[in-house]
Image (spheres, rainbow, N blue to C red):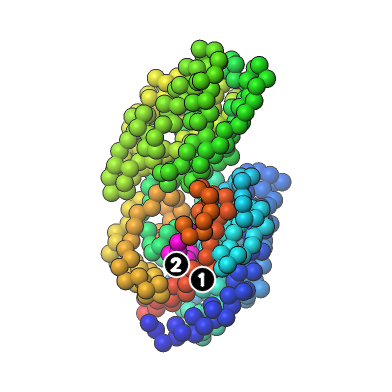
C-alpha cells in the first residue's frame, strides 16, 4: 500500500460522524423521480436533493453546479486530459408502507447500521465520491487529472439525465460508478421493459392495482369486485434484476380470484396473467435463455386497469448472447396467445468489457487490498448503471462486503429497492477508502 494511504485512512475514520450525518441529510429528501413536475425534468424533490448534494461539494471547496433544466449536478476540478469521472445519483425508487425500522425518509443509525430509502442506492455513492476526494486532499495528494463528479436525477427511471451529460459535457477517459456490487463489474445485462394490456376488458373485477416502478417486484395489489367485495394481497419484493426468492403479488391475487365466483371472461384473463408471471425467467413467454450473464430474468412491477382492461409491466434483463429483436418478437407472440397486446417501453442493450487493461487492474487491486479480499473477482451484473452510457466505465460498490442477513429483518427487507434499505457504516468507510486509493492510482496512470 502507498505510504500516504494511512493518512487517507485516518481522515476517513476521524470523519466517521460527518460522513454519516451528511448521508442522512441527503436521505431526508424524498427524491422519487417524477417527470415534468413543477417545470423540472424530474420533479421538485429530486431537484432539492441535487441542490443539497451540490452544497456539500461546494462547502468542501469543490465547485459544483446544478443543471436544473437537465436534472443533474456537476462538479469539475480542472486538470490534465479527459481525466476521471465519478458518477452517482440522488434519485430513489418509490417506497412501500411496511418499513419496520423507521419511516423511509427519516434515516436512523442503529448498532452501526443506517436505515432509509436511498441510504445505499445511491446516496451513499454520492457521499463516497465526496469524501474520497476530501480524504485525498487532506492527505496532501494533489491530483493532476481533470476530475468530473456527476450526480444524477433519473437513474432509476430510464437514465434520461445522463443523456444531457453525454451531449453537453466532456466525457472522462475513465469513469467509476459506485452504484453496484463488490468488487467491480465487467458488464451489464440489457434491460427490456414491456407494457402488456389485455385485449378484452374485465367485467367483474373493477380494480386490480399495485406497484409504482418497473424495477421493483410488485409486493401489494388492491382488488375490488363489482359486487362490492374488496381485498388486498401481499407478496415479497426484490430488485427486478434479482427476482429469485421474490413472490409477485399480482400472481397471488390472480390465484385467489380464480377460486372466487367471477365470470368466465375474467377467469380467462386471470389465468393468462398467472401464466405470464409464473417463474423468474420468462419460461411461459418463450424467452428463456442463459449464457455468460446467467439466466434471462423477467419480473413484473406494476398492474392496474386502463379503460377496464388489465395493464401490467415486465422488466426483462438479458445477456449479450440474446438477440433482443427476436426476444421482443417471441415475447409479443407469446403474450398475443395469452390474450395481451405488447408495447416496448424501453430496450437498453447491455455491454461486456475487456477484463484486461490497467484501469481494471487498478480498480480490482484497490478493492482487494483495502478489504483484504485477495481472491475477489470481477463479475457481470444484472442491474443497470450509468456505466452503459459512458466510456471506459467501471461499476463498483460504495462499500465493502457485509452480511445483511445478520440484521434479522423480515424477508424482502434491507436491500436496495426493498423496505428498510440498510448500510453498515464500517463497510461504507472501507468503500470510501478504496475509492480514494483507486482515484489516486488512476490519476498517476493517466498523467505519467
Q: Is residue 145 magenta?
A: no
Return the mark for residue 27.
Answer: none
- Marks 1/2 in contact by CB < 8 Å: the verdict is yes
Instruction: Name the spot of residue 387 as percent of width and height, x first.
Output: 43, 56
Which residue range is magenta in the image?
Answer: 397-404
- Residue 391 visible in the current orientation: yes
**In this rendering, position of residue 443 left or right of residue 122:** left
Q: Secondary structure at mark 1?
A: helix
Q: Disc 2 designates what residue?
A: 400
The one nearer the camera, 169 or 432, is 432
Would residue 421 appear left or right of 3 to someone viewing this image? right
What residue sits 42% from the left and 21% below the top?
Answer: 338
Q: Main secondary structure of the magenta part?
A: loop
When the figure is inspected, residue 349 is found, relative to residue 362, above or below; the finding is: above
Going 33% across and 66% down the picture, which residue do you hit? 376
User: Dot 1, how many residues are within 10 Å of its Cα: few (below 14), some (14-19), or many (20+)?
Assistant: some
What percent of the width, then of the height, locates residue 161? 55, 51
Amino acid at each position: 500500500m502507498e505510504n500516504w494511504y494511512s493518512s487517507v485512512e485516518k481522515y476517513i475514520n476521524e470523519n466517521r460522524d460527518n460522513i454519516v450525518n451528511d448521508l442522512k441529510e441527503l436521505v431526508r429528501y424524498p427524491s422519487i423521480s417524477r417527470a415534468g413536475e413543477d417545470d423540472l425534468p424530474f420533479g421538485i424533490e429530486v431537484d432539492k436533493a441535487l441542490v443539497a448534494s451540490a452544497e456539500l461539494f461546494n462547502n468542501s471547496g469543490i465547485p459544483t453546479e446544478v443543471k436544473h433544466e437537465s436534472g443533474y449536478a456537476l462538479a469539475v476540478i480542472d486538470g490534465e486530459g479527459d481525466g476521471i469521472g465519478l458518477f452517482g445519483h440522488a434519485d430513489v425508487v418509490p417506497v412501500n408502507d411496511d418499513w419496520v425500522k423507521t419511516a423511509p425518509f427519516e434515516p436512523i443509525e442503529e448498532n452501526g447500521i443506517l436505515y432509509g430509502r436511498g441510504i445505499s442506492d445511491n446516496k451513499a455513492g454520492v457521499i463516497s465520491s465526496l469524501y474520497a476526494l476530501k480524504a485525498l486532499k487532506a492527505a496532501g495528494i494533489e491530483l493532476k487529472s481533470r476530475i468530473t463528479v456527476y450526480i444524477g436525477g433519473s437513474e432509476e427511471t430510464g437514465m434520461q439525465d445522463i443523456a444531457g451529460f453525454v451531449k453537453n459535457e466532456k466525457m472522462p477517459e475513465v469513469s467509476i460508478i459506485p452504484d453496484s456490487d463488490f468488487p467491480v463489474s465487467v458488464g451489464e445485462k440489457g434491460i427490456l421493459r414491456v407494457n402488456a394490456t389485455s385485449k378484452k376488458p374485465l367485467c367483474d373485477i373493477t380494480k386490480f392495482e399495485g406497484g409504482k416502478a418497473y424495477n421493483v417486484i410488485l409486493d401489494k395489489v388492491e382488488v375490488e369486485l363489482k359486487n362490492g367485495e374488496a381485498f388486498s394481497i401481499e407478496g415479497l419484493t426484490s430488485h427486478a434484476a434479482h427476482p429469485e426468492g421474490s413472490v409477485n403479488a399480482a400472481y397471488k391475487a390472480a390465484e385467489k380470484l380464480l377460486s372466487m365466483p367471477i365470470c368466465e371472461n375474467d377467469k380467462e384473463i386471470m389465468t393468462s396473467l398467472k401464466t405470464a408471471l409464473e417463474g423468474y425467467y420468462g419460461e411461459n413467454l418463450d424467452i428463456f435463455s442463459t449464457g455468460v450473464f446467467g439466466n434471462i430474468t423477467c419480473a413484473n412491477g406494476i398492474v392496474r386497469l386502463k379503460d377496464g382492461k388489465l395493464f401490467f409491466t415486465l422488466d426483462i434483463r438479458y445477456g449479450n448472447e440474446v438477440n433482443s429483436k427476436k426476444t421482443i418478437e417471441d415475447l409479443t407472440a407469446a403474450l398475443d396467445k395469452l390474450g395481451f397486446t405488447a408495447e416496448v417501453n424501453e430496450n437498453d442493450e447491455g455491454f461486456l468489457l475487456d477484463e484486461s487493461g490497467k484501469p481494471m487492474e487498478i480498480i480490482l487491486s484497490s478493492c482487494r487490498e483495502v478489504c483484504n479480499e485477495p481472491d475477489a473477482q470481477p463479475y457481470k451484473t444484472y442491474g443497470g448503471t450509468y456505466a452503459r452510457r459512458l466510456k471506459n466505465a467501471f461499476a463498483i460498490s460504495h462499500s465493502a462486503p457485509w452480511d445483511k442477513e445478520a440484521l434479522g429483518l423480515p424477508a424482502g427487507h434491507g436491500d436496495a429497492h426493498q423496505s428498510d434499505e440498510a448500510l453498515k457504516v464500517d463497510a461504507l468507510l472501507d468503500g470510501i477508502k478504496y475509492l480514494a486509493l483507486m482515484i489516486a492510482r488512476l490519476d498517476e496512470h493517466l498523467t505519467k
